Image (spheres, grey):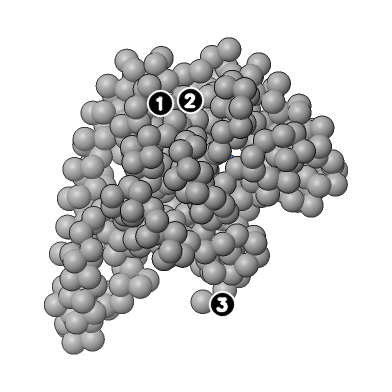
Amino acid sequence: MSEEFTVTPWEVKGFIDYDKLIKDFGTQPLTDEILERVRRLAGELHIHLRRRIFFSHRDFDWILDKYEAGEKFILYTGRGPSGHIHLGHLLPWFFTRWLQEKFNAKLIFQMTNDEKFLYRHDLSMDDALKFSYENSLDLIALGFEPERTVILIDTLASKTLYNIAIRIAKHVTTSTVKAIFGFEDSTNIGMMFFPAIQAAPCFIESVLQGRNIPCLIPAAIDQDPYWRMTRDVAPKVGFYKPAQVHCKFLPGLGVGGKMSSSMPETCIFTIDDPDEVYRKVMNAFTGGKPTREEQRRLGGNPEVCTVFHYEYYLFEDDDKRVKELELMCRSGQLLCGECKLELAAKIRLFLTEHQKRREDARNAIDKYLYID
Ligand code: TRP
Protein backbone atom coordinates (compact mmCIF):
# COMPACT_ATOMS: atom_id res chain seq x y z
CA MET A 1 0.00 0.00 0.00
CA SER A 2 1.29 3.42 -0.83
CA GLU A 3 -0.24 5.42 2.03
CA GLU A 4 1.96 7.45 4.32
CA PHE A 5 3.01 5.89 7.60
CA THR A 6 5.01 6.93 10.65
CA VAL A 7 7.07 4.79 13.00
CA THR A 8 8.91 6.51 15.86
CA PRO A 9 9.28 5.58 19.55
CA TRP A 10 6.36 7.95 20.28
CA GLU A 11 4.08 7.52 17.34
CA VAL A 12 3.08 4.65 15.07
CA LYS A 13 0.39 5.25 12.49
CA GLY A 14 -0.81 4.33 9.02
CA PHE A 15 -0.38 1.17 6.97
CA ILE A 16 3.17 0.17 7.66
CA ASP A 17 5.46 -1.00 4.88
CA TYR A 18 7.84 -3.23 6.80
CA ASP A 19 10.21 -3.80 3.89
CA LYS A 20 10.62 -0.08 3.61
CA LEU A 21 11.34 0.14 7.33
CA ILE A 22 14.17 -2.37 6.96
CA LYS A 23 15.69 -0.10 4.34
CA ASP A 24 15.01 3.17 6.13
CA PHE A 25 16.30 1.93 9.48
CA GLY A 26 19.18 0.02 7.92
CA THR A 27 18.34 -3.30 9.60
CA GLN A 28 18.53 -6.81 8.10
CA PRO A 29 15.64 -9.07 7.13
CA LEU A 30 15.40 -12.33 9.10
CA THR A 31 16.51 -14.87 6.53
CA ASP A 32 15.55 -18.52 6.17
CA GLU A 33 19.12 -19.36 7.02
CA ILE A 34 18.91 -17.65 10.41
CA LEU A 35 15.57 -19.29 11.10
CA GLU A 36 17.05 -22.69 10.32
CA ARG A 37 19.84 -22.08 12.79
CA VAL A 38 17.32 -21.08 15.44
CA ARG A 39 15.27 -24.18 14.71
CA ARG A 40 18.33 -26.36 15.09
CA LEU A 41 19.38 -24.78 18.38
CA ALA A 42 15.91 -24.46 19.91
CA GLY A 43 14.46 -27.70 18.55
CA GLU A 44 11.48 -25.83 17.05
CA LEU A 45 10.49 -22.46 15.62
CA HIS A 46 8.18 -20.12 17.47
CA ILE A 47 5.13 -19.03 15.44
CA HIS A 48 6.38 -15.44 15.46
CA LEU A 49 9.44 -16.58 13.54
CA ARG A 50 7.60 -19.01 11.27
CA ARG A 51 5.14 -16.27 10.36
CA ARG A 52 7.70 -13.49 10.23
CA ILE A 53 5.97 -11.44 12.93
CA PHE A 54 9.57 -10.97 14.00
CA PHE A 55 10.95 -9.98 10.65
CA SER A 56 14.07 -7.89 11.03
CA HIS A 57 17.26 -7.88 13.09
CA ARG A 58 20.72 -6.55 13.74
CA ASP A 59 23.42 -9.08 14.64
CA PHE A 60 21.03 -11.87 15.56
CA ASP A 61 23.37 -14.16 13.59
CA TRP A 62 26.26 -12.94 15.71
CA ILE A 63 24.29 -13.79 18.89
CA LEU A 64 23.85 -17.32 17.49
CA ASP A 65 27.57 -17.55 16.66
CA LYS A 66 28.39 -16.63 20.24
CA TYR A 67 25.83 -19.03 21.62
CA GLU A 68 27.18 -21.87 19.51
CA ALA A 69 30.65 -21.04 20.78
CA GLY A 70 29.39 -21.43 24.34
CA GLU A 71 28.92 -17.77 25.18
CA LYS A 72 25.45 -17.17 26.60
CA PHE A 73 23.53 -13.99 25.94
CA ILE A 74 21.08 -11.99 28.00
CA LEU A 75 17.72 -10.76 26.79
CA TYR A 76 16.63 -7.20 27.34
CA THR A 77 13.26 -5.65 26.67
CA GLY A 78 10.95 -3.14 28.31
CA ARG A 79 7.81 -1.11 28.56
CA GLY A 80 6.82 2.51 29.00
CA PRO A 81 4.29 2.20 31.84
CA SER A 82 1.72 4.82 30.86
CA GLY A 83 -1.40 2.68 31.13
CA HIS A 84 -2.70 -0.86 31.21
CA ILE A 85 -1.35 -3.61 29.00
CA HIS A 86 -3.14 -4.69 25.84
CA LEU A 87 -2.53 -7.61 23.50
CA GLY A 88 -0.25 -5.53 21.30
CA HIS A 89 2.15 -5.05 24.20
CA LEU A 90 2.15 -8.75 24.98
CA LEU A 91 3.11 -9.72 21.43
CA PRO A 92 6.91 -9.40 21.78
CA TRP A 93 6.82 -10.71 25.34
CA PHE A 94 5.49 -14.09 24.24
CA PHE A 95 8.45 -14.53 21.95
CA THR A 96 10.83 -13.24 24.60
CA ARG A 97 9.49 -15.87 27.00
CA TRP A 98 10.13 -18.54 24.41
CA LEU A 99 13.69 -17.30 23.89
CA GLN A 100 14.28 -17.37 27.64
CA GLU A 101 13.19 -20.97 27.81
CA LYS A 102 14.93 -22.26 24.71
CA PHE A 103 18.22 -20.46 25.19
CA ASN A 104 18.33 -20.50 28.96
CA ALA A 105 18.69 -16.76 28.96
CA LYS A 106 18.38 -14.22 31.70
CA LEU A 107 15.91 -11.41 30.96
CA ILE A 108 16.33 -7.82 32.04
CA PHE A 109 13.07 -5.96 31.75
CA GLN A 110 13.00 -2.18 32.04
CA MET A 111 9.93 -0.19 33.14
CA THR A 112 10.62 3.36 32.05
CA ASN A 113 8.42 5.21 34.52
CA ASP A 114 10.85 8.16 34.28
CA GLU A 115 10.45 8.34 30.49
CA LYS A 116 6.67 8.32 30.64
CA PHE A 117 6.64 10.96 33.37
CA LEU A 118 8.97 13.15 31.31
CA TYR A 119 7.13 12.69 28.06
CA ARG A 120 3.49 12.81 29.11
CA HIS A 121 1.96 15.98 30.50
CA ASP A 122 -0.91 14.13 32.05
CA LEU A 123 0.94 11.41 33.94
CA SER A 124 2.17 11.90 37.52
CA MET A 125 5.13 10.07 39.02
CA ASP A 126 2.67 8.14 41.19
CA ASP A 127 0.68 7.01 38.15
CA ALA A 128 3.77 5.92 36.27
CA LEU A 129 4.96 3.96 39.30
CA LYS A 130 1.54 2.38 39.79
CA PHE A 131 1.48 1.24 36.15
CA SER A 132 5.03 -0.09 36.50
CA TYR A 133 3.76 -2.52 39.13
CA GLU A 134 0.54 -3.30 37.28
CA ASN A 135 2.36 -3.97 34.01
CA SER A 136 4.90 -6.16 35.82
CA LEU A 137 2.02 -8.45 36.82
CA ASP A 138 1.25 -9.04 33.14
CA LEU A 139 4.85 -9.85 32.41
CA ILE A 140 5.09 -12.29 35.30
CA ALA A 141 1.77 -13.88 34.30
CA LEU A 142 3.36 -15.01 31.03
CA GLY A 143 5.57 -17.40 32.98
CA PHE A 144 8.94 -15.67 33.10
CA GLU A 145 11.07 -17.47 35.65
CA PRO A 146 11.91 -15.55 38.84
CA GLU A 147 15.44 -16.98 38.94
CA ARG A 148 16.23 -15.61 35.51
CA THR A 149 14.12 -12.47 35.22
CA VAL A 150 14.89 -9.07 36.63
CA ILE A 151 12.47 -6.14 36.43
CA LEU A 152 14.03 -2.72 36.71
CA ILE A 153 11.63 0.10 37.48
CA ASP A 154 13.86 2.99 36.51
CA THR A 155 13.43 5.25 39.54
CA LEU A 156 13.86 2.29 41.91
CA ALA A 157 17.01 1.04 40.18
CA SER A 158 18.40 4.49 39.61
CA LYS A 159 21.79 4.00 41.21
CA THR A 160 22.80 1.13 38.96
CA LEU A 161 21.25 2.68 35.86
CA TYR A 162 22.69 6.14 36.42
CA ASN A 163 26.22 4.87 36.85
CA ILE A 164 26.08 3.19 33.46
CA ALA A 165 24.00 5.91 31.77
CA ILE A 166 26.53 8.67 32.43
CA ARG A 167 29.26 6.61 30.76
CA ILE A 168 27.05 6.41 27.68
CA ALA A 169 25.76 9.99 27.82
CA LYS A 170 29.31 11.32 27.72
CA HIS A 171 29.61 10.04 24.14
CA VAL A 172 26.29 11.35 22.83
CA THR A 173 25.99 14.96 21.76
CA THR A 174 22.89 17.12 21.63
CA SER A 175 23.02 17.20 17.85
CA THR A 176 23.09 13.40 17.73
CA VAL A 177 19.94 12.98 19.84
CA LYS A 178 18.26 15.73 17.89
CA ALA A 179 19.01 13.93 14.65
CA ILE A 180 18.06 10.46 15.91
CA PHE A 181 14.98 11.31 17.96
CA GLY A 182 13.83 14.56 16.41
CA PHE A 183 14.30 16.47 19.67
CA GLU A 184 14.07 20.23 19.48
CA ASP A 185 15.24 23.14 21.58
CA SER A 186 11.88 23.07 23.33
CA THR A 187 12.33 19.40 24.39
CA ASN A 188 12.90 19.08 28.12
CA ILE A 189 16.40 18.08 29.17
CA GLY A 190 15.12 14.96 30.92
CA MET A 191 14.05 13.58 27.56
CA MET A 192 17.42 14.51 26.10
CA PHE A 193 19.23 12.44 28.70
CA PHE A 194 16.72 9.60 28.80
CA PRO A 195 18.13 7.63 25.81
CA ALA A 196 21.21 6.92 27.93
CA ILE A 197 18.94 5.40 30.59
CA GLN A 198 17.27 3.17 28.03
CA ALA A 199 20.67 2.11 26.73
CA ALA A 200 22.03 1.23 30.18
CA PRO A 201 20.33 -2.18 30.70
CA CYS A 202 22.18 -3.52 27.63
CA PHE A 203 25.35 -3.39 29.69
CA ILE A 204 24.17 -4.09 33.24
CA GLU A 205 25.05 -7.75 33.14
CA SER A 206 28.48 -6.98 31.72
CA VAL A 207 29.09 -4.44 34.49
CA LEU A 208 27.81 -6.71 37.25
CA GLN A 209 29.84 -9.70 36.04
CA GLY A 210 32.90 -7.71 35.06
CA ARG A 211 33.14 -9.22 31.58
CA ASN A 212 31.42 -8.63 28.26
CA ILE A 213 28.11 -10.43 27.83
CA PRO A 214 26.17 -10.39 24.56
CA CYS A 215 22.73 -8.81 24.72
CA LEU A 216 19.75 -9.48 22.45
CA ILE A 217 16.78 -7.11 22.44
CA PRO A 218 13.47 -8.55 21.21
CA ALA A 219 11.09 -5.60 20.74
CA ALA A 220 8.85 -3.82 18.29
CA ILE A 221 10.75 -1.96 15.61
CA ASP A 222 9.72 1.51 16.82
CA GLN A 223 12.41 1.33 19.53
CA ASP A 224 15.17 0.97 16.96
CA PRO A 225 16.42 4.58 17.21
CA TYR A 226 17.55 3.87 20.77
CA TRP A 227 19.60 0.91 19.61
CA ARG A 228 21.20 2.81 16.76
CA MET A 229 22.49 5.28 19.33
CA THR A 230 23.51 2.53 21.76
CA ARG A 231 25.34 0.52 19.13
CA ASP A 232 27.30 3.56 18.15
CA VAL A 233 28.48 4.19 21.70
CA ALA A 234 29.02 0.60 22.88
CA PRO A 235 32.53 0.07 21.49
CA LYS A 236 33.61 3.47 22.80
CA VAL A 237 32.87 2.35 26.33
CA GLY A 238 34.24 -1.14 25.85
CA PHE A 239 31.03 -3.17 25.46
CA TYR A 240 29.59 -5.41 22.76
CA LYS A 241 26.99 -3.76 20.56
CA PRO A 242 23.54 -4.97 21.58
CA ALA A 243 21.79 -7.12 18.96
CA GLN A 244 18.13 -6.76 18.10
CA VAL A 245 15.29 -8.76 16.71
CA HIS A 246 12.34 -6.60 15.69
CA CYS A 247 8.65 -7.38 15.48
CA LYS A 248 5.70 -5.89 13.68
CA PHE A 249 2.80 -4.21 15.45
CA LEU A 250 -0.37 -6.04 16.30
CA PRO A 251 -3.11 -4.29 14.34
CA GLY A 252 -6.07 -2.80 16.21
CA LEU A 253 -9.56 -4.16 15.67
CA GLY A 254 -10.48 -1.08 13.62
CA VAL A 255 -9.29 -0.08 10.15
CA GLY A 256 -5.48 0.25 9.79
CA GLY A 257 -2.85 1.18 12.36
CA LYS A 258 -1.61 -0.70 15.41
CA MET A 259 -3.56 -1.59 18.52
CA SER A 260 -3.52 1.56 20.60
CA SER A 261 -4.72 2.45 24.09
CA SER A 262 -6.04 5.73 22.74
CA MET A 263 -8.71 3.76 20.86
CA PRO A 264 -10.03 1.45 23.61
CA GLU A 265 -12.86 0.05 21.48
CA THR A 266 -10.38 -1.43 19.02
CA CYS A 267 -8.06 -2.64 21.69
CA ILE A 268 -8.14 -5.63 24.05
CA PHE A 269 -6.68 -4.94 27.46
CA THR A 270 -5.53 -7.78 29.70
CA ILE A 271 -7.82 -6.49 32.44
CA ASP A 272 -10.90 -6.32 30.19
CA ASP A 273 -13.90 -8.28 31.35
CA PRO A 274 -13.62 -11.49 29.28
CA ASP A 275 -17.29 -11.16 28.31
CA GLU A 276 -16.78 -7.60 27.06
CA VAL A 277 -14.36 -9.02 24.55
CA TYR A 278 -17.19 -10.61 22.63
CA ARG A 279 -18.59 -7.19 21.96
CA LYS A 280 -15.24 -5.79 20.83
CA VAL A 281 -14.60 -8.74 18.54
CA MET A 282 -18.13 -8.64 17.14
CA ASN A 283 -17.58 -4.99 16.16
CA ALA A 284 -14.18 -5.66 14.62
CA PHE A 285 -13.33 -4.65 11.07
CA THR A 286 -13.21 -7.70 8.81
CA GLY A 287 -12.51 -8.49 5.19
CA GLY A 288 -16.10 -9.62 4.72
CA LYS A 289 -18.67 -8.53 2.18
CA PRO A 290 -21.64 -6.36 3.13
CA THR A 291 -24.18 -9.16 2.77
CA ARG A 292 -24.25 -12.84 3.52
CA GLU A 293 -25.20 -13.65 -0.04
CA GLU A 294 -22.27 -11.71 -1.51
CA GLN A 295 -19.89 -13.29 0.95
CA ARG A 296 -21.03 -16.79 -0.07
CA ARG A 297 -20.66 -15.89 -3.72
CA LEU A 298 -17.46 -13.82 -3.73
CA GLY A 299 -15.69 -14.80 -0.50
CA GLY A 300 -13.91 -12.53 1.97
CA ASN A 301 -10.46 -11.03 2.10
CA PRO A 302 -8.35 -12.25 5.03
CA GLU A 303 -5.48 -9.91 4.15
CA VAL A 304 -7.30 -6.88 5.49
CA CYS A 305 -9.28 -8.71 8.16
CA THR A 306 -8.43 -7.92 11.78
CA VAL A 307 -10.07 -11.13 12.98
CA PHE A 308 -7.81 -13.15 10.71
CA HIS A 309 -4.82 -11.09 11.84
CA TYR A 310 -5.49 -12.00 15.45
CA GLU A 311 -5.57 -15.67 14.64
CA TYR A 312 -2.39 -15.30 12.65
CA TYR A 313 -0.46 -13.15 15.11
CA LEU A 314 -1.50 -14.73 18.37
CA PHE A 315 -4.35 -17.13 18.76
CA GLU A 316 -3.96 -19.99 16.29
CA ASP A 317 -0.72 -21.94 16.71
CA ASP A 318 -1.63 -24.54 14.17
CA ASP A 319 -0.43 -23.50 10.71
CA LYS A 320 -2.84 -25.92 9.06
CA ARG A 321 -5.84 -24.36 10.78
CA VAL A 322 -4.67 -20.86 9.77
CA LYS A 323 -4.47 -21.98 6.15
CA GLU A 324 -7.87 -23.57 6.44
CA LEU A 325 -9.43 -20.38 7.84
CA GLU A 326 -7.87 -18.41 5.03
CA LEU A 327 -9.14 -20.72 2.29
CA MET A 328 -12.61 -21.06 3.79
CA CYS A 329 -12.87 -17.29 4.03
CA ARG A 330 -11.74 -16.70 0.46
CA SER A 331 -14.10 -19.29 -0.90
CA GLY A 332 -17.11 -17.88 0.96
CA GLN A 333 -17.60 -21.02 3.05
CA LEU A 334 -16.87 -19.21 6.30
CA LEU A 335 -18.90 -16.18 7.30
CA CYS A 336 -17.56 -13.38 9.49
CA GLY A 337 -19.96 -14.09 12.32
CA GLU A 338 -18.71 -17.66 12.82
CA CYS A 339 -15.12 -16.59 12.49
CA LYS A 340 -15.55 -13.84 15.07
CA LEU A 341 -17.14 -16.26 17.51
CA GLU A 342 -14.20 -18.63 17.20
CA LEU A 343 -11.73 -15.85 17.90
CA ALA A 344 -13.77 -14.34 20.73
CA ALA A 345 -13.89 -17.71 22.47
CA LYS A 346 -10.10 -18.07 22.24
CA ILE A 347 -9.49 -14.58 23.54
CA ARG A 348 -11.96 -15.08 26.34
CA LEU A 349 -10.19 -18.24 27.45
CA PHE A 350 -6.81 -16.57 27.28
CA LEU A 351 -7.97 -13.57 29.32
CA THR A 352 -9.63 -15.69 31.97
CA GLU A 353 -6.45 -17.68 32.54
CA HIS A 354 -4.17 -14.69 32.22
CA GLN A 355 -6.15 -12.78 34.82
CA LYS A 356 -5.79 -15.62 37.31
CA ARG A 357 -2.04 -15.77 36.81
CA ARG A 358 -1.90 -11.99 36.96
CA GLU A 359 -3.50 -11.98 40.42
CA ASP A 360 -1.13 -14.70 41.62
CA ALA A 361 1.74 -12.55 40.42
CA ARG A 362 0.98 -9.97 43.12
CA ASN A 363 2.53 -12.31 45.67
CA ALA A 364 5.54 -13.04 43.49
CA ILE A 365 6.52 -9.60 42.27
CA ASP A 366 9.15 -9.03 44.98
CA LYS A 367 11.15 -11.92 43.56
CA TYR A 368 11.53 -10.05 40.26
CA LEU A 369 12.18 -6.45 41.25
CA TYR A 370 15.70 -5.10 41.31
CA ILE A 371 15.89 -2.25 43.80
CA ASP A 372 19.10 -0.43 44.67
N1 TRP B 1 10.75 3.15 25.57
C1 TRP B 1 9.96 1.95 25.64
C2 TRP B 1 8.46 2.34 25.55
O1 TRP B 1 8.09 3.46 25.63
C3 TRP B 1 10.22 1.17 26.89
C4 TRP B 1 11.52 0.40 26.83
C5 TRP B 1 12.60 0.58 27.62
C6 TRP B 1 11.83 -0.67 25.95
N2 TRP B 1 13.59 -0.31 27.34
C7 TRP B 1 13.14 -1.09 26.30
C8 TRP B 1 11.14 -1.31 24.93
C9 TRP B 1 13.77 -2.15 25.62
C10 TRP B 1 11.75 -2.35 24.28
C11 TRP B 1 13.06 -2.75 24.61
O2 TRP B 1 7.64 1.45 25.43
Per the model, the C-alpha gap separating discs 3 and 2 is: 40 Å
As drawn, the label of residue 148 is 1
The mark nearer the N terminus, 3 or 1, is 3
Instruction: Return the disc, 3 or 2, that comes first in the chain's sequence.
Output: 3
Q: CA distance from mark 3 to mark 1?
A: 44 Å
Quadrant of the rendered image containing residue 226:
top right
The amino acid pointed to by label 3 is Ser
Q: Where is residue 273? Give x, y as percent.
A: 26, 38
Query: Which tag is nearer the camera, tag 1 or tag 2?
Result: 1
The single residue placed furthest to the bottom in the displayed view is 297
**Left-right relation of 307 to 111:** left
Which disc, if any, is residue 239?
Answer: none
Give the percent coordinates (x, y) of residue 36: 37, 60
Q: Is residue 257 visible?
A: no
Q: Residues within 10 Å of mark 2 (few under 14, many from 20)?
A: many
Task: Judge by depth and name the residue closer to the eye, 13 or 47.
Answer: 47
Disc 3 or disc 2, which is closer to the eye? 2
287 or 216, nearer to the observer: 216
The dot on residue 2 is 3
C-alpha span from label 1 to label 2? 10 Å
As displayed, is residue 340 above or below residue 186? below
Of 321 and 344, the residue lying toward us: 321
| Label 3 neighbour load within 10 Å: few <14, some 14-19, many 20+ | few
Label 3: which secondary element: loop
Type of amino acid under label 1 = Arg
Q: Secondary structure at mark 1?
A: helix
Percent position of residue 102, x then y? 34, 41
Q: Vertically, is 59 above or below 113? A: below
Relative to residue 3, is residue 10 depicted above or below?
above
Q: Which residue is mark 2?
A: 151
Q: Which residue is at 80% across, 39% downward?
A: 172
Residue type, mark 2 in image: Ile
